[in-house]
């Protein structure tokens, strides 16, 4: 390995964190085991999103952007924070013009 290849390899390992793991037999299938450290570091939960690319696959944690919203809305209702700030119908509104 020449100096240029060595530097490129070091940079790749520094920025990408290359890792080699075995493919193991799981029942009739084959799979990989991910360490607890990886699962915690990348916030992988019970499910992963897998994207298949031309020559590799990418694993991503599944975003749940609305997780916890239901509880927050219930709490907001209990605190009276879900009342309308503006009435549905204005006092001076002429609804007949919409007929």
Image (cartoon, rainbow, N blue to C red):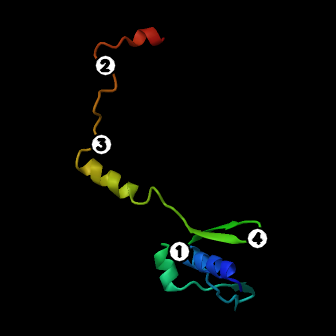
Sequence-earlier tag: 4 or 1: 1
Q: CA distance from mark 2 to mark 3?
A: 19 Å
Of residues 49 and 7, the one drawn nearer to the viewer in this rendering: 7
What residue sits right under mark 4 in the picture? 55
- Name the element at disc 3: loop
**Real-space CA distance between mark 4 and mark 3, rounded to the nearest whole angstrom:** 50 Å
Quadrant of image for the N terminus: bottom right
Q: Residue 86 bears which disc, if any?
A: none
- Mark 3 — residue? 82
Question: With respect to residue 79, does 13 lie above or below?
Answer: below
Quick one: label 2 or label 3, which is nearer the N terminus?
3
Q: Are marks 4 and 1 in contact (CB under 8 Å)?
A: no
CA gap, disc 4 and disc 1: 26 Å
Q: Position of residue 10 (x, y in %)?
A: 59, 80
Which residue carries the number 2 mark?
90
Q: Describe residue 90's horizontal placement relative to residue 60 as left or right.
A: left
Point 72% across, 72% down: residue: 56
Mark in the foreground, 4 or 3 = 4
Residue 46 disc label: 1
Viewer-nearest residue: 46 or 75 = 46
Q: Position of residue 72 (x, y in %)?
A: 33, 55
Viewer-nearest of discs 3 and 1? 1
Which element is circle 4 on? loop
Q: Earlier in the sequence, mark 2 or mark 1?
A: 1
Could you say which quadrant of the image residue 93 lies in? top left
- Determine contact: label 4, label 2, CB under 8 Å: no
């Amino acid at each position: 390995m020449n100096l240029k290849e060595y530097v490129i390899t070091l940079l790749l390992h520094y920025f990408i964190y290359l890792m080699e793991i075995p493919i193991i037999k799981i029942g009739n299938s084959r799979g990989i085991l991910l360490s607890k450290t990886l699962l915690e570091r990348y916030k992988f939960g019970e499910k992963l999103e897998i994207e298949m690319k031309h020559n590799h696959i990418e694993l991503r944690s599944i975003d749940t952007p609305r997780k916890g919203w239901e509880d927050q809305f219930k709490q907001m209702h209990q605190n009276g924070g879900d009342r309308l700030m503006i009435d549905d119908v204005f006092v001076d509104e002429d609804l007949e013009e919409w007929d």
